[in-house]
Amino acid sequence: MKFDRKHYSDDTLRNLYHSLVKPRLIEEKMLILLRQNRVSKWFSGIGQEAIAVGATAALESDEYVLPLHRNLGVFTVRNCPLPKLFAQWQGKQDGYTKGRDRSFHFGTHDEHIIGMISHLGPQLAVADGIALADKLAGNPKVTLVFSGDGGASEGDFHEALNVAAVWDLPVIFLVENNGYGLSTPNNEQFRCRSFIDKGIGYGMDAFQVDGNNVLEVYDTVQQLSRNLRKRPRPILLEALTFRMRGHEEASGTKYVPQVLFEEWGKKDPVLNYERYLLEQNVLTTDEIEKVRQDIRQEIEQALSVVFDLPEVVVDTEEELADMYYTPTSSAHSSNENPSTGERSIRFIDAISESLRQSMEQFPELVLMGQDIADYGGVFKITDGFVSKFGKDRVRNTPLCESAILGASLGLSIKGYKAMVEMQFADFVTSGFNQIVNNLAKSHYRWGQNADVVVRMPTGANTAAGPFHSQSNEAWFFHTPGLKVVYPSNPYDAKGLLNAALADPNPYLYFEHKYLYRSISGPVPEEYYTVPIGKAALVSEGEDLTIVTYGLCVHWAKEIIAELGEGGSVDIIDLRTLLPWDKEAVAKSVQKTGRVLVVHEDTLSGGIGAEIAAWIGENCFMYLDAPVMREGSLDTAVPFSPVLEKNFLPRKRMEEKIKKLLAY
């Protein structure tokens, strides 16, 4: 050990020893239970404990840590109750996720820990959001987030570090460099000699520590965190270490040369620290044995409790309900039946007005997106917002959809609301994982809501080609935990967006670009909301039900008007796609007996297929004709206006309507 003895009190040294030994002894017990089939899987951190223990111990107890699956020491240093941890690993109801997820895939606000998802990289951006929240609130705090050397190859690593650097966020990005990403050695992962070489590319300071030296890790993180609290900015910290067991136990270690085990075995962080404490007369061999015995006894007592716990009792209603967060009370006032008066505004202006009023309604709301600040966004929806609300709350972002969506979850963790604007809905593919695996599943997994609205300028009919015209709402309609809305007129555009921003659940808010400046309508000046999950009956009739949304609502109205007295039609504007209004659809089908479901999205696998199937299953006895669907061609969206017109379902809608009316 290269540290001056006088820098550390005996109590500090003893506490660090206890913290270092505890995860080692728990792991040794877990490996026995794994062989006994009493835990299903284990990712061993044996040989790497000094990093998690030293870094976490160096922070203040209310500073957030985002660990990975080999960082048991984070949880034990923060004194997570062992019975609850063990229940988590055994999939018991008393665990942190009620048996819904495994190992360290959870968070706990009591201990200020946000666990991982299996995709490794996305949590780096969540750390950005937590740090941003602290910075906005003026809290001098640091956020620590872990990455493995393999996970640092993910695009999320680059995006998160770049955002943190641009925004001067107080995040310590700690890379545990153990030489392998599962079985792939570092020389097949990257070409730089070490991770600290990457720091200069992000304009951030970078440091390297011996990850097997608990005092070096502790001292370094303590010094860095003190500095970051005074001068917020990100740091890249590389900890050199070695994984003494497989990536997880089933994978083994045959791919690792034996000489590395011999070399790193001599650097065992627990044994070396023990020797140091004995040399410094801080602990005796008897005291060391007592520490170990006390921890073993604590482990056995906790296990005896957990082994007696019953298996999970299935409650389907609870499973469904927990996909979403239900607030106990509403913190804002809303008007769901305002008077429209005589004022008429454009679709795009209704969206802008909603954002502006919601920013006034919710001081904790932060807007993020490419070019949304001084430029006002590519569609000018946030034009003038910076002068009214400032750049802290109206934030230009780098080109990094994944990082900003991840940061939005981090803001939610700290009690903020976030609106993320996709410049075009097509670009959401670059952030897809954050939406479907982080935002959508967070509440179900461990009770953390994602108070996030993702605005999605969508749709064709503008001759913008295959990458600026897609209708991709069906991707998210299939994802439990999300809510999806899609207005067709200015009144609903404002009211639904207000409702989405007020609701502390994750939303995809689709706004059709063609409608932005092509339609106007009556919209109240005051703040109001439109109920989520309730369809609107646009026109009434007896002969046919058309179920649709977005631009197709206007096409349906045009076609029916052109038919004159040739048909009497119910047009149902769904407005909300997830959840969709089954009651309104069933009521109309029962009356008309004929149904056409239409969407602008490509036909196969679209939302219309689900609605048609539901009608066939639940309303068959009322049908006088087959349930029909129409949508765009099963091709990419073409650029040429002639090809695009053929692609879109407008003409085929008319043919299907006539066919059903004549059936």
Image (cartoon, rainbow, N blue to C red):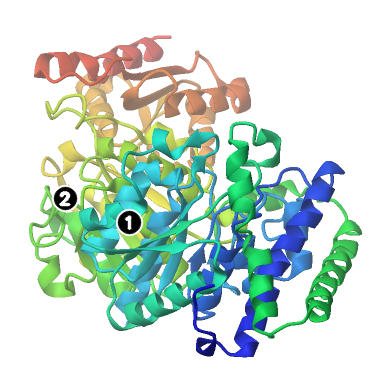
Residue under label 1, please give it: 196
Question: Mark 2 highlights which residue?
Answer: 348
What residue is shown at x 54% (from left), y 72% (from top)?
1
Q: Nearer the viewer, mark 2 or mark 1?
A: 1
| Residue 329 seen in the current view | no
At 55% from the left and 62% from the top, the residue drawn is 212
- Tell me where residue 244 appears, x and y as whole percent: 64, 48
Left-right relation of 429 to 68: left
**Residue type (three-letter) at the residue carrying disc 1:** Ile
Q: Residue at x 73, y 71 (%)?
A: 81
Q: Which numbered disc, 2 or 1, marks the residue that appears first in the sequence?
A: 1
User: x and y percent of residue 66 in the render?
Assistant: 50, 62
Task: Left or right? Give the position of 278 relative to 661.
Answer: right
Q: Crowding near pointer 2: few (<14 within 10 Å), some, many (20+)?
A: many
| Residue farthest along the front direction in this orientation | 279
Residue situated in front as seen by the camera: 127 or 525: 127
* Residue type marked 2: Ile
How many numbered discs sit on the rendered protein? 2
Instruction: Locate residue 574, reporting x and y percent.
Output: 40, 39
> How far is the residue under mark 2 from the one under mark 1?
46 Å
